[in-house]
Image (cartoon, rainbow, N blue to C red):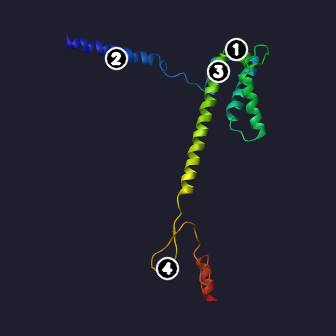
Amino acid sequence: MNQTVRTEQETKMHEKETLDEKLPGLFEPDTLLPIQYFEAMRRKHLLEGEKRLILSVLEDAIECFMKCIDATTSKGQRLFRDAEEWINLEDKHWVFSFDNVCEMLDINPDYMRAGLRRWKERHLELKARRALEKAEQEAALASEPKVLAEPELHTGEPKAQSTPVAPARRKSEAPRPASRSAALRKARA
């Protein structure tokens, strides 16, 4: 009896393993970058000229949206704004609207729009988190006192100082030569 229970469990585990092998990625999250989607689409279908043009329009808008989100130039910022406005505009009347372009390529426009919004939110959160971490690090470095030892005073103990000071030279002390050959020339003179 115990052995039959064990064989049934082994059989079920083997069936599960073969199901996972047969359908890899079935239980993986639905995360896909636009470029991955477009590459897969290109491999599956040989697109005709018009569809390739429409796909290029969509790819360009998504590329401007993703690459120019952090733009510092006015041109880059304008490209991002234009792409974002085009993506967010829900319009079925204009032939090259985001909704119509997506539908011509058999892409759900609402799904694509929601994915791009989530990407933007995550990107901006990550950017803000990095800026906060950098500011905290800079504040921590700025608040640390920089202590350098001063020459000994009458007590024989060095005094701590909060600002760096270059060592003072005696009037009789000449500057050190930069290299060994310069020192030899000076000694010969």
Q: Identify the image quadrant of the N terminus.
A: top left
Q: Amino acid at mark 3?
A: Met
The kind of residue on which mark 1 rests is Glu
Secondary structure under badge 1?
Answer: helix
Label 4 sits on a secondary structure element that is loop
Give the residue at mark 1: 103
Circle 4 Cα neighbour tier, 10 Å, few/some/many (<14 / 14–19 / ≥20): few
Where residue 59 sits: x, y (%)?
Answer: 70, 26
Residue at x 77% of width, y 34% of height = 78
What amino acid is at disc 2?
Met
Residue depth check, mark 3 versus mark 2: number of the one nearer the observer: 3
- What kind of residue is marked 4? Leu
Q: 11 left or right of 70?
A: left
Q: Are marks 1 and 3 in contact (CB under 8 Å)?
A: no
Query: Which residue, given by chain and number where applicable, does mark 4 sit on?
Result: 153
Nearer to the camera, 105 or 158: 158
To which residue does mark 3 refer? 112
Name of the residue lying farthest toward the bottom: 189
- Residue assigned mark 2: 13
Residue 181 sits above or below residue 140 on the image: below
Which circle's residue, 4 or 2, is located before the other in the chain? 2
